[in-house]
Image (cartoon, grey):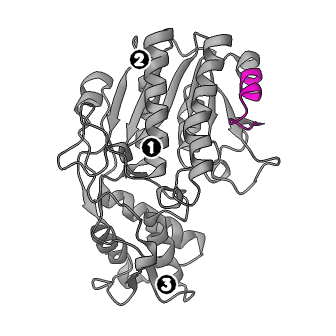
Amino acid sequence: MKNTKARTAIITGIDGQDGPYLAKLLATKGYKVYGITRQSTRNESSNLTSLGLQNEVDIIQCDICDPMLVSRLIRRIAPTEFYNLAAQSFVGGSWDLAGITTQINANAVLGILQAIQNYSPSTRFYQASTSELFGNSSNKQDEETPFAPESPYAAAKLYAYWTTKIFRKSHGIHASNGILFNHESPIRGPQFVTRKITKGIANIVAGKAEVIELGNLDAKRDWGFAGDFVEAMWLMTQQESSDDYVVATGKTHSIRDFLDIAFSQIGIADWSHYVKSNRNFFRPSDVNVLQGDPAKARAVLGWTPKTSFKELVTMMVHSDLKLLGVSIPKHLSSVA
């Protein structure tokens, strides 16, 4: 591994979930971190602020879909590492936002890699890929599992995946794909099902809601903690040779499992009266089961997840309760 002294990193998608966790990791390692956002003004209630990083990251406004702006940025900073986490990341919305999804998740990646090739070829590049590439695969998915995307989101991400591999092979760029399975946290966007559940529970306890409306309760996912997964991203850029890695826990849970643990935090065993499955929230084409095999990441990167599924769900519920200023009754605190 390389010396981390005087390193610089650019993180796109700094306003999302993974960007702040990655920025926190890099800051502890002494990096100068630049965060890219499309926003014209800084949001003081952003996820960076939530993690206490408001003074740790230099925010730069830049539309990554504009190759000229990206080229100027990379030529000026010449970062040691470039982490492309920016995306239209809501799979369910990618049918209605197919054009925007393609621009951000696919075309922008080509522009970034071309800029690195032309102006900073020693920069090490990380591309945030996704388990949605696999579609409805019947077995555990690893790096050799065939891709079968089921959404505009996954199709755009597949383009980015192959573009990253091509620049690695054809131009010698140190470029890695992290095929990340579902990873959540207290700062997950409220449109995602996990956060929709935990925020909904907090609203129920606070008397602000009676029911949480969800889509397919039987969908199964391999859920991990975003704070663990960003370490794998960093480890990929530290290797002598770039490569592609599945990042996952190796365990799968249904949305019903998530609901069981989440509602248990407020002492409710039977949540059926508080949850409604709404067909309007079903995707036109959905992936039933996703379960990753992180053996390669474990063997090559030395990476393993530290946070259990139960710990993750508990963390998220308690965070949303705290955000609303709601306390768990004392007679229920032992459940948590």
Q: Which residue is mark 3?
A: 205
Alpha carbons under labels 3 and 1: distance apart: 39 Å
For disc 2, the neighbor class at 10 Å (few under 14, some 14 to 19, many from 20) is many
Alpha carbons under labels 2 and 3: distance apart: 48 Å
Q: Residue 266 in magenta?
A: no
The label on residue 155 is 1
Name which residue lies at 41% across and 17% down: 242
> Is 312 above or below relative to 239?
below
Closer to us: mark 1 or mark 2? 1
User: Which corner quadrant of the image does residue 278 belong to?
Assistant: bottom left
Residue 313 image offset from top left, x and y in percent: 38, 63
Q: Is residue 259 visible?
A: yes
| Secondary structure of the residue carrying numbered label 3 | helix
State which region is magenta: 61-73
* Labelled pair 2, 3 in contact (Cβ < 8 Å): no
Q: Is residue 230 left or right of residue 258?
A: right
Name which residue lies at 64% across and 15% down: 6
Q: Which residue is mark 2?
A: 242
For disc 3, the neighbor class at 10 Å (few under 14, some 14 to 19, many from 20) is some
Name which residue lies at 68% across and 12% down: 119
Q: How many marks?
A: 3
Residue 188 image offset from top left, x and y in percent: 52, 57
Q: Is residue 7 visible?
A: no
> Is 165 above or below relative to 278?
above
Which kind of residue does numbered mark 1 sit on? Ala
Alpha carbons under labels 1 and 2: distance apart: 23 Å
Q: Quadrant of the C terminus?
A: bottom left
Name which residue lies at 42% across and 25% down: 235
Q: Mark 3 or 1 closer to N-term?
A: 1
